[in-house]
Image (cartoon, grey):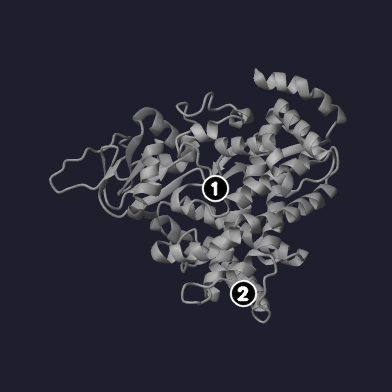
Amino acid sequence: MVTHVSPTSTPRRAPGPKGLPFLGSLPDLGRDVLGFFTQCARHYGDVVSFRLAAWPAMLLNHPDFVECVLVKNHQNFIKHRFFWRHVEAIFGQGLLTSEGKFWHQQRRLAAPAFAVSRVSRYGDTMVQYTGRMLQQWQPGQVLDVHQEAIALTLQIAAKTLFDAETRQDVAEVSRTIDEVMEQISVRFRRPFWVPDALPLPGNLRYRRGVQRMNQLVARIIADRQDRLEDRGDLLSQLMLARDEAGQPMSERQIRDEVITMLLAGHETTALTLSWAWYLLGLHPAVDVQLAVEVDRILGGRFPTVDDLPRLRYTEQVVSEVLRLYPPAYAIGRQALADCEIGGFHVPAGATVYVSPWVMHRDPRWFDDPHAFRPERWAGNLAKDLPRFAYMPFGGGPRVCIGNRFAMMEAVLILATVAQQFRLAWLPDRPVQPKPSITLRPDGGVWVRLVSRPMEAVGLEDKSRQTLRH
């Protein structure tokens, strides 16, 4: 429960690590953010207090308290401006960073672009591009499927966002995104703000990437201005949107939304696929069960959106991957005014963290929480869980607007690949989570491509027996 603090109240300070003089817990957070959050929850409970240099911070580890911040009292908690001003030049005032009435207006204008009926149209594109990727794969080939996933989802995003299909456009977007995302990762690890204007090597690379992205998007938008029509992509919907006064989005705002969706959208699905192929390589019984379902439902043909309700185990695999390796491993908000959460004082200006990485591995909500068990989602778990015990796409008014798009894309791509290949993970290429702006596999996910053996269907009974145990 959240309550505002009255002048006569004496709220308690939540327990937590003392940290170092002057620096507080900043070194611990910078060295191993996942481990730090995990240890805080284990040793101090559901509300943890610590310092990041001179700034107060808190970690919430109970669904009820998360709901207070993201839903019940969300007006008192905004995106932390200290972190997001690191990347204001690239994201601008898009849905990821804007606040207040302006965010509400933009969310309303963008919502029709992500309606179920419209998102469903993109299924064929997702499968078509996956098929093109598979044509380049050969049995026995060793490759980094993380990079393959990045390239694939970027091509899909470029096509569905602004109908860009030429290799030149996609290659240009890819090079620019690689450079910009690397600099974003560096900036999110900094405990201090460095103005973009300083001529540091990283700043120069970042500014060049931002400029190239601006030029690319401006060119695409300019090409549309003379023949404004719905071409079936998201850019068309944004350009045709009108506010209550009948006014369209400004060119600058369309730019901000397109770049936000491009950067955030393709990365989320690529990471989900990367971690899925890694986990499937570690758990061959699950991989066989997935292949059995795909063969039974599809019978050798490519999947369509109409197949999604029947690809239940494939969806369970994706749900379990998002539980263990959520791309958004931490969510931060800044308190505007003093309040209480769980009986503990939250001072104005404090950074309040919620970690899906920690919440999704809490034994109070998930049996055997560190195990990869997609079948746990077969029953009523999703309905029985507390509302914010599982939150791979965030929650509340600011829940990810593209969550349906991402889930549909991950299931369709996973099913398409499973028809043709088993991805045998190479144990001499260890994979470690690297928390940056998102949760990436450090060093990639290297596999050997194995043609899907036809006898896999005959292993159905054996795989089910293995999964039950």
Q: Position of residue 5 (x, y in %)?
A: 21, 47
Residue at coordinates 60% horizontally, 62% vertically from top-left?
113
Pick whichever, 110 or 330, lies toward us: 110
Asked if residue 135 lies left or right of residue 100, the reply is: right
**Disc 1 designates what residue?**
438
Q: Is residue 356 above or below residue 462?
A: below
Q: Circle 2 is placed at which residue position?
A: 218
User: In which quadrant of the rendered image does the C terminus lie?
Assistant: top right
Q: Position of residue 272 (x, y in %)?
A: 63, 43
Relative to 428, does residue 391 appear above or below in the rendering? below
Residue positioned 67% across, 74% down in the render: 229
Residue 59 visible to the viewer:
yes
Q: Amino acid at mark 1?
A: Thr
Q: Secondary structure at mark 2?
A: helix
The answer to whether residue 427 is seen in the rendering is no
Q: Identity of the amino acid at label 2?
A: Ala
Q: Is residue 107 left or right of residue 233?
A: left
Question: Could you tell me which secondary element the residue under label 1 belongs to?
Answer: loop
Q: Residues within 10 Å of mark 2 (few under 14, many from 20)?
A: some
> What residue is rendered at 83% in x and 24% in y?
458
